[in-house]
Amino acid sequence: MLTVNPAKRITASDALKHPWICQRERVASVVHRQETVDCLKKFNARRKLKGAILTTMLATRNFSSRSIITKKGDGSQVKESTDSSTTLEDDDIKEESDYCYTRLRLDSEDTDARKQEVIKITEQLLEAITAGDYDAYTKICDPHLTSFEPESLGNLVEGMDFHKYYFDHVAPKSSKFLNTTILNPNVHLLGEEAACIAYVRLTQYLDKQGATQVCQCEETRVWQKKDSKWQNVHFHRSSNTPSFSYPQHK
């Protein structure tokens, strides 16, 4: 009826006979229902892409504290219902993105805290060795501790008896002149209850003439958490100094 050319216009009588008017209960509902189904299909298709979208966003944001989501139009017209669902979905994606980023940040902080925990218990172990405190040493080590070290001449040693000899006969004579430092600790977490740490151990001590000496060795220790406590279950130590030198033992 809005056609400019009067000859092509339909009359009021024709308009009343149109299916939209005379069969509105059937025709109109079917058309609107189909539009709704089309919108739902588009919405579900977008939801299937959420995982890929979130992964891309997290990869490109470089773990920054904020993200900017930019959307470019393609020049085509979009129905109002589609605009509404797109807006809701964008908010949903942003919420999930923020949640994923928060979880990643918390997991990273938890990993750093656990690594510091392994470094701290390693320092406590070396303090017990430096002080010649065998009781403190046994509390941190597993009873079936295994090790490779210069004193064992390349043989695998198991248990505490081999190490106790040095605490009983060597440590009391020299412990108060020792100072041990850990350099460049590198921790690898092996699950929730195991970890491996590698580091350089620097030891300062006084020789028989009273002169200050420094020796260095490289150590790797494997830790296992038992009853919520870290225990040293294995270590490997290399050294360029003589095997009988106390500052390097254990």
Image (cartoon, grey):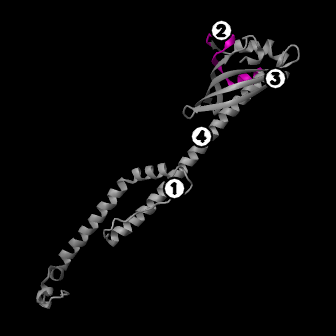
Q: How many discs mark residues in the rendered view?
A: 4
Residue 150 painted magenta: yes
Q: Which secondary structure, mark 3?
A: loop
Q: Residue at x 31, y 63 (%)?
A: 40
Identify residue type, mark 4. Answer: Thr
How far apart are labels 3 and 1 at the CA level?
Answer: 51 Å
* Number of the label disc, if any, that sits on residue 111: 4
**Which percent across, then down, holds residue 130?**
78, 23
- Give how far apart the Cα atoms at labels 2 and 1 are: 56 Å
The residue at which mark 2 appears reads as 153
Q: Secondary structure at mark 2?
A: loop
Q: Are marks 1 and 4 in contact (CB under 8 Å)?
A: no
Q: Position of residue 71 (x, y in %)?
A: 41, 62
Task: Point out the tag, 4 or 3, that comes first from the N-terminus.
Answer: 4
- Label 1 crowd (10 A; few <14 / some 14-19 / many >=20): some
Mark 1 or mark 4: name the one nearer the start of the chain: 1
The residue segment tinted magenta is 134-156
Q: Amino acid at mark 2?
A: Leu
Q: Quadrant of residue 241?
A: top right
Q: CA distance from mark 4 to mark 3?
A: 32 Å
Give the image quarter of residue 16.
bottom left
